[in-house]
Image: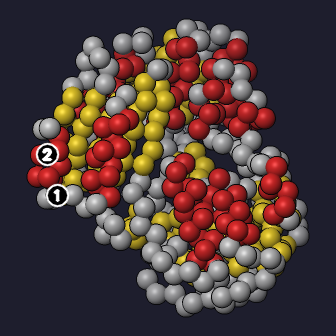
Amino acid sequence: MSVVSQPDSPRRVVIVGASLAGLHAARTLRQEGFDGLLTIVGGEHHLPYDRPPLTKQVLSAGWELDRIDLSREEDASLAIDWRLGTRATSLDTRARRIGLSDGSSVAYDGLVIATGATPRRLPGTPDLDGIHVLRTLEDALALRAELDDMPGRVVIVGSGFVGAEVAAACRLRNIDVTIVEALPSPFARVLGTSVGEACVAMHRDRGVDVRGHAAVMHYDGGRRVGRVVLADGEVIEADVVVVGIGVQPETGWLEGSGLDLTDGVLCDETCLAAPDIVAAGDIARWPNPRFGRTMRVEHWDNAIRQGEHAARRLLGRKEPFDPLPWFWSDQYDRKLQLAGDPISHDEVVLLEEFGDAERLVALYRRGDRLAAVAGINRSRRVLEFRRLIQEGAKWTDAISVASR
């Protein structure tokens, strides 16, 4: 992908997305000496907040906005023009202007796209009370209010990490939970079958009914959901349904802009999407030179680093963005960590089996290289192999380290 270099010194930068990536882009712009006009457009009415606690502490421990607010006292010195509660609706790259949902528009000569992603929904989902997705603070508070009423059963559709964390939060409240997954092996799409089975065991040991080969056909109820009907005809009673089947990049406002919107905003390896335009966070898709493939990463750590990198790119820095993806998921009293790129792996080797000790380490091979490592309650071991992946270690070298 070839793009034309943009001016080295933009005087008006607009960040669309009051997100983790957007906030870190703003901080980095000021830290790097940008003293022009800086505007952040955000569809929610809140300043940027931390999303990982939404599926954990907000649901299970009653955390409020003040516990997840990402703003700092020193952010007041950033001189940001906040446009909160206002969504971007269009982008005119020729006029360098962004249309807003209140009917106004804002001009830019440098643009950071950080609008993130929005939850996927099953086609034909009826408008029934009790069916939830979980992405925003309002989503979490609405779900928490229903859980406070102690429903008889929660059904979670999809075995992603959001659903798994919601399941753990529900079990901490002693609420019955069923996870239904259309694929044969829950949790296996990203983690592989063996590590996925360990995650299934972790939930089943805590009373969660986890089912694979369980595609949802439709939901039944009056004004409120009451049953989930599976493709094989089985009916599961449900007082609350949480749909966690992944997210899709929030690119609707960019239609007609001329940007490549295939699974996000396509950038070059430096995060540049077009002259004067960069993208960061869940919405950005770029060729990561470390792995030799185009990727889009939906993790907290990546949002921070890519927001910072994109800001520097807007100011003229042209280094490639080549992170090693890394994330974690807290479920019950267990911490699952994954570092690297396990997609399309050729082999998985378990160094430690998941059993009574409830811990696990797994290595993923692609070709002759160590591609990824996953661990449950083995942080130090995960960090050890994470360093090897960063160094480009061969598979044989990783296995040698594993045997020590």
Q: Say left or right for 80 vs 70.
A: right
Nearer to the camera, 76 or 191: 76
Query: Which residue is painted at 71% across and 37% down in the image?
Result: 68
Mark 2 crowdedness (10 Å alpha carbons): few <14, some 14-19, many ≥20? some
The residue positioned 78% from the left and 83% from the top of the image is 11
Which residue position holds label 1?
394
Residue closer to the observer: 145 or 359: 359
Measured as percent of width and height from the top left, residue 117 is found at 59, 53
- Density class for disc 1 (Cα within 10 Å; few <14, some 14-19, many ≥20) is some
276 vs 385: above or below: below
Q: Nearer the viewer, residue 208 or 377?
A: 377
Residue beneath disc 2: 399
Q: Is residue 84 left or right of residue 171?
A: right
Q: Quadrant of the N terminus?
A: bottom left
In front here: 321 or 159? 321
Whether residue 153 appears in this view of the structure is no
Q: CA distance from mark 1 to mark 2?
A: 9 Å
Report the quarter where the C terminus lies: top left
Vertical order, 373 against 26 (above or below)? above
**Residue under the image location 63 percent in, 78 percent down:** 314
Secondary structure state at the residue bearing disc 1: loop
Amino acid residing under circle 2: Ile
The answer, for residue 210, to whether it is visible in the render is yes
Image quadrant where residue 368 sits: bottom left
Q: Quarter-wise, where is residue 53 in the image?
A: top right
* Residue 198 in picture, x, y percent from top left: 29, 26
Quarter assignment of residue 243? top right
Q: Which residue sits at x=32%, y=52%?
A: 387
Numbered-mark total: 2
Amino acid on which disc 1 is placed: Lys
For mark 2, give the secondary structure.
helix
Which tag, 1 or 2, sits closer to the chain's start? 1
